[in-house]
């Protein structure tokens, strides 16, 4: 029972941070939503279902959790926005060690996204309807 409370608290905090990440540079949205989904899957089927059926990001969470991956277009946009916000952050921070840390984190995320997360393929029947 106590573990469910901890997981639900972490999940709710992750959703809040994920929503903030939509508007704030350098605060990622997707990892927080994936963390929330993982926490809710173990602690609250109702909240997990809410995330998976959300009209804005539910499809992406379902596809990722089912092992289908992320669409190529989504990967490209994620990398473009991530690197744009990181370059802006490096420029604003103007501190060498912060810039190096940001580039290191960005490189690791880029490698993970391009090499380890599957790219979802569009079936011909969906791409070209009759």
Image (cartoon, rainbow, N blue to C red):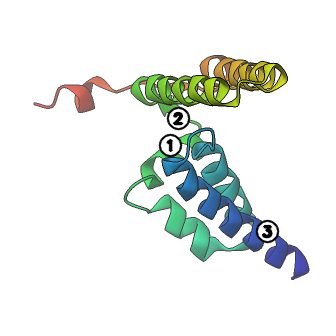
Marks 2 & 1, CB-CB < 8 Å contact: yes
| 26 shown above or below 93 | below
**Which quarter of the rendered picture does the N terminus lie within?**
bottom right
- Which residue in the structure is indicated by mark 1? 63
Q: Earlier in the sequence, mark 3 or mark 2?
A: 3
On the image, which quarter does residue 89 sit in?
Answer: top right
| 41 shown above or below 77 | below
Q: Earlier in the sequence, mark 3 or mark 1?
A: 3
Q: Nearer the viewer, mark 3 or mark 2?
A: 3
**Which quarter of the rendered picture does the C terminus lie within?**
top left
Residue at x 80%, y 19% (from the top left corner): 96
Measured from the top left, where is residue 114 in percent x and y? 60, 18
- Which residue in the structure is indicated by mark 2? 68
As measured in the structure, the alpha-carbon distance from the residue carrying label 2 to the one carrying label 1 is 5 Å
- Which residue in the structure is indicated by mark 3? 7
- Residue 40 lies left or right of residue 72; in this view the side is right
């Amino acid at each position: 029972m106590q573990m469910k409370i901890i997981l639900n608290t972490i999940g709710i905090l992750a959703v809040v941070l994920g929503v903030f990440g939509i508007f704030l540079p350098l605060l990622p949205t997707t990892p927080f939503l994936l963390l929330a989904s993982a926490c809710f899957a173990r602690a609250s089927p109702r909240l997990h279902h809410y995330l998976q059926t959300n009209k804005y990001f539910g499809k992406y969470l379902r596809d990722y959790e089912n092992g289908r991956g992320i669409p190529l277009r989504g990967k490209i946009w994620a990398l473009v926005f991530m690197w744009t916000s990181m370059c802006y952050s490096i420029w604003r921070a103007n501190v060498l060690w912060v810039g190096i840390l940001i580039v290191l984190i960005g490189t690791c995320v880029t490698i993970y996204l391009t090499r380890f997360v599957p790219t979802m393929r569009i079936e011909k029947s969906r791409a070209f309807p009759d």
